[in-house]
Amino acid sequence: MATNTLRTRRFSWPLWQKLLASVVLLLAALVLVVIFFPWDVLREPLNRYVSEKTGRKFEITRRLDVGVGWRQATVKFDGIEFANPSWARDPYLVKADRAEFDIRIWPLISSKIVIPRLSLSSPTVGLQMEADGRRTWAFGKDTSDGGTVPDIGTIQVDTGAVDFLAKHLGVDVHADLSYDTSRGELPLDYRIKGRYKGQPLTANGRTGNVLQINAAGAPPFPIEINAAAGQTQLKAAGTVAALSDLDGIDATFQIKGQTLGALFPLLGIALPQTSPYALSGKLGKRGKLWEANALKGKLGLSDISGDMKFDQAGKLPHLTGDLRSRVMDMDDLGPLIGLPPTARTASTVEGVAPPPTVTQVKRPGGKVLPTAPLDFERLRAMNADVKYTADRIQNVRDIPLDRGSVQVKLDNGVLTLDPLDLGVAGGKLAGAIRIDASKNPADIRASLDVRAMQLARLIPKLETTGNSVGRLDGRINLSGSGSTVANWLGGVSGDVAIISGRGQFGNLLPVFATLVGGDIIKFLLRGDRNVELRCAAIAFDVSKGLMNSRTVVLDTTNAVFTAAGQANLATESLDFVVRPEPKSKNILSIRTPLVVSGTFGNPRGGLQVAPLAERGLAALALGAINPLLALAATIENGPGEDADCKSVLADANKPTAGAAANGAARAKSAKQP
């Protein structure tokens, strides 16, 4: 009996061991139940439950199966139809032959849906966004606050179609998808058609079989795209880490179009209007920072290269960069100030339809000043700090530009070009331009200095004859308000002054200006002689668009030229009288004032009739007495005297009081201290 009692005590389990064994057995039973549970019996209850919770029809059409793990479950739908809200255009959010997804278990406790992987077979997907925040992929009866949006990691799709509509963003596109393993690393082919930002959009390309929406830690997936929106065409190939915010981009790209300005509605980057362009480079994105490096290409007939960055992290996006042209063509400057491209530059990019050109666009009333409106919306859309340098400028024709550089800064709607440095005629035009687009019309100020320009370079006929003329120095200080270059100039006030010291040039120019017949004969017999320039000054007081001559004097060794009059920048009209005063007695002189009139686009020159008629009548009267006496009427007694050059230059150097002086002072504030 003792032995039996001992055996009973030896094999008796403590209570805690019995409880542990019971728990293990229970868990094992639960695992077996989960593994072998006929999940399809829950299909109809699940259909009703989801439909009730979301307020739209949800149906697993054929079979439901679930695989449960400790951290996540794998759900398989054999046939699925999930309707869109009643306000959506497309009837279904998703309709597919099969759907399979992994879902995290523990986040469900806090009503958060995390789907690391989603696989769809032959799906049709209808996505739509509204301006008030509603989205078709937000779950819940009320999606005005966005509803419950699932966090999706990767998506696998085979043949199918996707529609996406966001009217407030200007997006309405349809994409067809096809999957073929024979395509290697890029088996998923897509073709997109629709509208983007109001422009027709077409695109096609290939990607890997897995699209990473928010897949943290996953390797980037490959993608290729060939797209066209309006006249803008893009080709790119590389990898993307996450599609949800286009993060982790590493790609090469080629882009071309009619003007860089067309990228503003497409990408939100406020670039200037340009000639047709073609650019290539490397594109990268990390977080909110986009980078376009090793840029290379052309704008019209000009080459361009450099690097750009576009940071979207701040309240306003910020564009920075450093761009350079080895050779910049003069015709490509036109679009920057509102002029259409010329015929030379309009057809320079293959595959891009040429825009309307200068010869095809008629100006109102035959005016020449640019009338294209300044785009204030663009100036307020972002901040910028970009430097541009042109090592050499070609095709200069009327304005002999040699080179140029400018620092473009945009800060809360205020655009400054400072410093602006243009090489002109062996000298330079340097200073600053400021446009405050926070006001409408904009407050525009220009303060520019003219330094050491060579007059012979400005007048090609002088340069080709080998004449040497003294340097030109001066300033342009103008300020006013406007929405175009034309109406700004039509209302500006300020000061314009150009002065020159001693130099030499051939006597042909002053001979024709003074109409001294004797000098013409001497020129024909002896050939050209150099005439000394003593001084010259051209200065205007500008008051509300009217340029009134303050000092217009050209003093040479054989004549003094003075002029008076005005140029109206609003009407683009000219009204000047030039008075030549020869310094020597010459026979065959029919000196008379010259009149310059007409418009900027069609200037006209002529003689004042009355003084000329007086001399002509005198010659006729004396000729009736004795033909030899007729020469007496054409003898110039030489009333001209040397100008007081010191006084002339001093007068030119100082604007008068009033609107001109106030406008000049405001313009000078455009320069940085």
Image: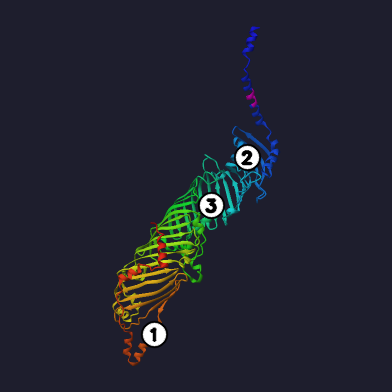
Dots 1, 2 in contact, CB < 8 A? no
Dots 1, 3 in contact, CB < 8 A? no
- The part of the chain drawn in magenta is 22-26
Q: Amino acid at mark 2?
A: Glu
Q: Amino acid at mark 1?
A: Ala
Disc number for residue 100: 2
* Label 1 vs label 3, nearer the camera: 1
Direction from residue 492 to residue 78 in the image, left or right = right
Q: Please name the predominant secondary structure of the magenta segment in the image.
A: helix
Let me know if residue 23 is in the magenta part.
yes
Question: Percent position (x, y) of residue 354?
Answer: 51, 62
Element under label 3?
Answer: strand
Quarter of the view holding residue 467:
bottom left
Q: CA distance from mark 3 to mark 2?
A: 31 Å
Mark closer to the chain start, 3 or 2: 2
Let me know if residue 158 is in the magenta part.
no
Give the residue number, with chain letter if any, for mark 3: 226
